[in-house]
């Protein structure tokens, strides 16, 4: 993914394992919200706590459902089963950060 490009990016892909969605990394998009949709399968979208001591927010997405990640909010995905996923965002300025266990 080219995080330096301009314009909206629509990405649809098949993920077999958590490695395919970089479940061990947080991702953030400072320029826009991101729509994450589970097209086929079952995934969990996690939002990083905004304050110390809070728990990750978990959003379960079944086939045909979607969620909006607020602009500037760190997030990650884990799979329950192999899934087809679609994401739409402005990638400019996006960053990845290795997840550390709490």
Image: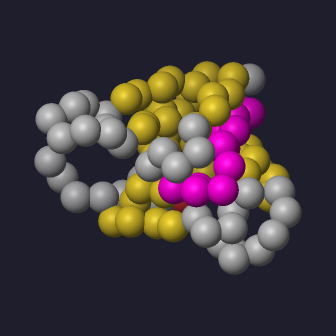
- Across and down, in percent, residue 95 comes to 51, 67
Rendered position, 24 above or below 88 = below
Whether residue 86 sits left or right of residue 75 in the image: it is right
At horizontal 18% and vertical 41% (from top left) the residue drawn is 52
Q: Position of residue 14 (x, y in %)?
A: 68, 51
> Which residues are drawn in magenta?
28-41
Most extreme residue toward the right is 7
Of residues 57 and 70, the one drawn nearer to the viewer in this rendering:
70
Relative to 75, say whether 22 is above or below: below
Between residue 52 and residue 12, name the one nearer to us: 52
Q: Position of residue 12 (x, y in %)?
A: 77, 51
- Residue 43: x and y, percent? 53, 34
Residue 102 seen: yes
Q: What residue lies at 69% left-to-right and 76% top-to-bottom?
A: 4
Residue 37 shown in magenta:
yes
Point 58% across, 56% down: residue: 30
Q: Quick one: quadrant of the N terminus?
A: bottom right
Residue 85 in view = no
Residue 29 within the magenta-colored segment of the rendering: yes
Residue 11 vs 78, above or below: the answer is below
Residue 24, quarter of the rendered image: bottom left
Q: Is residue 95 found left or right of 87 in the rendered image? A: left
Q: Which image quadrant for residue 9?
A: bottom right
Q: Image point 30% across, 58% down: which residue? A: 99
From the viewer's perspective, is residue 55 above or below residue 34?
above
Name the main secondary structure of what is drawn in magenta: strand
- Compare residues 8 and 100 and report the one nearer the observer: 8
């Amino acid at each position: 993914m080219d995080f330096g490009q301009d314009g909206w990016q629509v990405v649809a892909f098949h993920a077999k394992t958590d490695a395919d969605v970089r479940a061990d990394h947080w991702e953030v998009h400072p320029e826009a919200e991101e729509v994450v949709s589970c097209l086929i399968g079952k995934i969990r979208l996690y939002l990083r706590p905004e304050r110390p001591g809070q728990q990750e927010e978990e959003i379960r997405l079944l086939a045909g459902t979607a969620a909006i990640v607020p602009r500037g909010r760190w997030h990650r995905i884990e799979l329950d089963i192999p899934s087809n996923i679609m994401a739409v965002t402005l990638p400019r300025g996006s960053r990845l950060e290795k997840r550390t266990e709490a």
